[in-house]
Amino acid sequence: MSEFNGFPKDFFAFFEDLRNNNDRTWFNDNKNRYHESVVSPISEFIVCIAPRLRKISRHYTADPRPHGGSMFRIYRDTRFSKDKTPYKTHAGVQFRHQAGKNAHAPGFYVHLATDGLFFGGGVWTPASPQLGRIRDYIADNARAWARIANAKRVRDVGGIKGDSLKRPPRGFDAEHIHIKDLKRKSFYVMTTADAPSALKPGFIDEVTEAFRRAMPLNRFITGALDLPF
């Protein structure tokens, strides 16, 4: 198993500088620094965590390629945003289910930013058909969902989270025991940490533990979608 020694100090320094110089000229002048301090360390992290992820499930992909792999691109989609700055000021890595085509697939996720980290698993804003199946599965398997949602390991990190509708979704009883979760548009369990944690070799152990904590949720979601776990 490859050994991860933590992200370099310049990892977060790069993003802090980018926050203050978020334009193409600065980025192009610092592209080599970006690859050395951000891209290469993330690729190394993905390689190192891959065997740990396989022990959790063999159906989630850990691909270290800078383009088309598990690492999110640094370029922002500004087409529908008032904020036209071209670059993200954080790094994101998604180990998505092998059946998934985009960020809306079930997966495990790591978010690295100067103002904090979060990492865990679940599904983020799935398309309406998939969201409907997850809600039906929760309603039909209320006890199984309660065991996941009420587990101490999940409650210790704030429980299952995700943006919610203001009203119950159509077709669901407003008095259902899990109506709070049935109103969700995303479902995830995340652990948080301060940025300096990522600079230490033990960070990979923290992420692995967070993935294990989110494993029952991801197993439930894949079951709802008739996918293997």
Image (cartoon, helix red, strand yellow):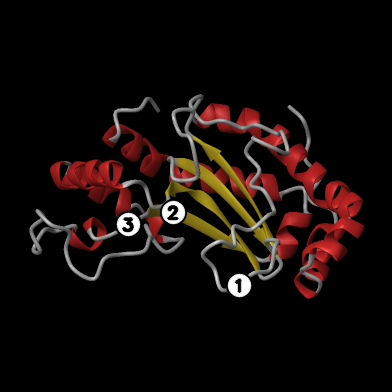
- The residues tagged by marks 3 and 2 sit, at their Cα atoms, a distance apart of 14 Å
Residue name at image x 77 percent, y 48 percent: 201
Quadrant of the rendered structure where residue 39 is?
top right
Lateral position of residue 19 relative to residue 145, left or right: right
Look at discs 3 and 1 and give the one toward the viewer: 1
Residue type for callout 2: Val
Per the image, the residue denoted by label 3 is 185
| Circle 1 residue | 83
Q: Earlier in the sequence, mark 2 or mark 1?
A: 1
Residue 71 placed where, x, y %? 66, 43
Q: Residue at x 32, y 39 (%)?
A: 220
At a point 73% along the width and 55% down the height, the residue shown is 198
Q: Is residue 189 above or below residue 56?
A: below
Occupied quadrant, residue 84: bottom right
Q: Amino acid at mark 3?
A: Lys
Q: Give me the C-alpha separation between circle 2 and circle 1.
A: 29 Å
Mark 3, residues whose alpha carbon is within 10 Å: few (<14), some, or many (≥20)?
many
Q: Could you tell me which quadrant the N terminus lies in? A: top right
Query: Mark 1: which secondary structure?
Result: loop
Residue on which disc 2 sits = 189
Q: Amino acid at mark 1?
A: Asp
Dots 3, 1 in contact, CB < 8 A: no
Q: Nearer the viewer, mark 3 or mark 2?
A: 3
Which is nearer the eye, 113 or 147? 113
